[in-house]
């Protein structure tokens, strides 16, 4: 029994949660989470949700239930073919608080990603704009009859190569 109880302490989901090992004949070892007293814990084998879990014949699962005016999630796992069950009851509000925290963290990460994407877009747009302006200025000079040598393009990207090609064209004319 102490070994089972110690194992149940690993299932502590905080204040208001309960974990239990229920033997096939109905004997229970219960752990009350978050410093609560096991005297305040429900008798799992007497709960309707426990009987629903048994009747489902599923090896594991979870169900919604109410107990003492509070909403709980009842999660269970059968212990092989023994008929014994390990179950936890966690207040829905505890699970929702975790979900809200995940939602908040996700929204922060999305906002950071959007800002980062905007910064990258602005950087790329400025880089492309300066390269396009260089090529456009050189083409305007050539079309106006100015075939004098220009400064070599600083960038090595496609726009820098085009600017170099325009300079080469102007020199050969």
Image (cartoon, rainbow, N blue to C red):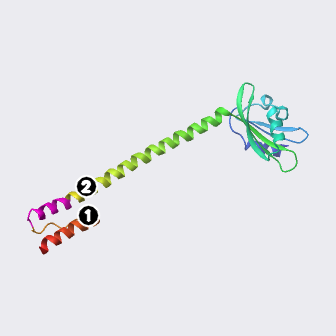
Q: Residues within 10 Å of mark 1 (few under 14, many from 20)?
A: many
**What residue is rendered at 13% in x and 73% in y?**
171
Q: Is residue 20 above or below residue 161?
A: above
Residue 142 visible to the viewer: yes
Q: Position of residue 150 (x, y in %)?
A: 14, 66
Which numbered circle lies on residue 113? none
| Quadrant of image for the N terminus | top right
Q: What is the chief secondary structure element of the magenta stretch?
A: helix
Outermost right residue: 25
Q: Position of residue 32 (x, y in %)?
A: 75, 35
**What residue is rendered at 32% in x and 50% in y?**
122
Q: Is residue 98 above or below residue 171?
A: above
Determine which residue is flagged by label 1: 159
Gap in angstroms between the C-alphas marked 1 and 2: 10 Å
Q: Secondary structure at mark 2?
A: helix
Query: Is 161 part of what is drawn in magenta?
Result: no
- Start-end of magenta stretch: 134-146
**What residue is rendered at 16% in x and 69% in y?**
167
Q: Is residue 54 left or right of residue 105?
A: right
Query: Is 139 part of what is drawn in magenta?
Result: yes
């Amino acid at each position: 029994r102490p070994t089972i109880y110690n194992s149940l302490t690993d299932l502590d989901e905080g204040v208001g949660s309960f974990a239990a090992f229920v033997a096939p004949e109905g004997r229970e070892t219960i752990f009350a989470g978050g410093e609560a007293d096991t005297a305040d814990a429900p008798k799992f084998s007497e709960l309707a949700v426990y009987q629903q879990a048994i009747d489902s014949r599923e090896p594991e699962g979870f169900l919604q239930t109410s107990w003492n005016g509070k909403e709980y999630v009842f999660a269970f796992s059968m212990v092989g073919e023994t008929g014994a069950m390990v179950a936890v009851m966690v207040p829905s509000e505890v699970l929702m608080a975790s979900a809200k925290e995940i939602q908040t963290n996700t929204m922060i990460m999305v906002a950071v990603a959007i800002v980062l994407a905007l910064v990258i877009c602005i950087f790329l747009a400025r880089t492309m704009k300066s390269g396009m302006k260089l090529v456009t200025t050189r083409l305007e000079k050539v079309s106006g009859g100015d075939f004098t040598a220009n400064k070599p393009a600083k960038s090595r990207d496609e726009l820098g190569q085009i600017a170099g090609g325009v300079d080469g064209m102007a020199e050969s004319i």
